[in-house]
Amino acid sequence: MKKILPLASVLVPGGCGDSCCGKPRQGGDNTACPVCGKAGEIVFGNTVRKLLKPGLAAPQDRYLICRTPDCAAVYFHPKGGLFRQEDVTVPVYFKAGAVPVYACYCAGVTKTQVVHAINKTGVTRWAAIIKEITGVVPKCGCEAKNPLGRCCSGNAYAAAMAESSAKPVPVRKSRDPLHGLTLETILTYMLELHGWEGLWRRIPVRCFQYDPGIKSSLVFLRANPWAREKLENWYICEVPKPKKTRG
Ligand SMILES: [Zn+2]
């Protein structure tokens, strides 16, 4: 049996798995970086504590991370406490001078490797790219390994796709990325990529954990729009988006 994380460490009000798309968490929690003055984004204390070098204490429940590339600050807290890149064990991918630039911290895969894999094989699905590089589909360890404490797949994916020779998959003509897709299609796709355990780790609902099946999961997801939305948003994150065209 896998050790199951207490839910409280995964789900905290105002910060849910939906933030994997790279959008800042909503809410009035943002505060200015003491170095550059730009608003930071919330990162949970658990993530900060796992990524700081030994001997550095980070007692708070939440911190803010500065996203400004050329700002020296990484984590900070409004009540004091400032950590810079040299205090953090992994290079923060969006900071200037990060070497290497990680695309996936969970799998230890760099953006250069991702671009190379896309160019070499033409695969464009995130899990398939990582599998091509490492031989396995990574277990999600974003909370502990990604400096943002959230899913790596949004990290450098768009950037790597843009740098690669991959033609974006023309998923939908419609602006709605889910247009024409049934819930069953989405569930089946995500199940193929992540397995039931992966689904449950991301969306901790009973139907993914106990005796899981497509049919029972569809029933649950249709009855629980919040869970359905999480799955759909996750799907949108992982499916290559068509490049914008004029007209
Ligand atoms: Zn800053």
Image: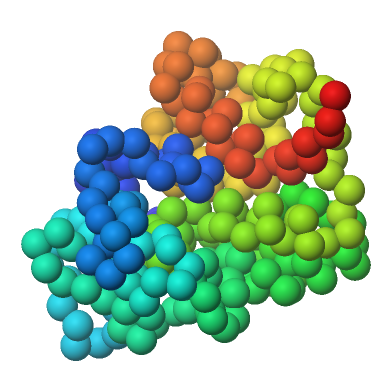
Which residue corresponds to the image point at 83% horizontal and 61% vertical from the top-left?
A: 164
In the current view of this chain or complex, which residue is farthest to the front? 37
Residue 85 percent location from the top left of the image? 38, 80
Q: Nearer the viewer, residue 55 or 133?
A: 55
Residue 202 percent location from the top left of the image? 46, 43
Residue 9 percent location from the top left of the image? 26, 51
Image quadrant of residue 169?
top right
The quadrant in which the C terminus is found is top right
Which residue corresponds to the image point at 43% horizontal and 63% vertical from the top-left?
A: 68
Q: Horizontally, is 26 left or right of 100 in the view?
A: left
Q: Nearer the viewer, residue 185 or 219?
A: 185
Q: Nearer the viewer, residue 110 or 96?
A: 96
Image quadrant of residue 144?
bottom left
Residue 81, placed above or below residue 78: below
The quadrant in which the N terminus is found is bottom left
Residue 87, placed above or below residue 70: below
Task: Examine the rendering and report whether any part of residue 131 can be seen.
Answer: no
Which residue corresponds to the image point at 32% horizontal and 65% vertical from the top-left?
A: 36
Residue 74 percent location from the top left of the image? 34, 70
Task: Examine the rendering and report whether any part of residue 21 can be seen.
Answer: yes
Q: Nearer the viewer, residue 125 or 42?
A: 42
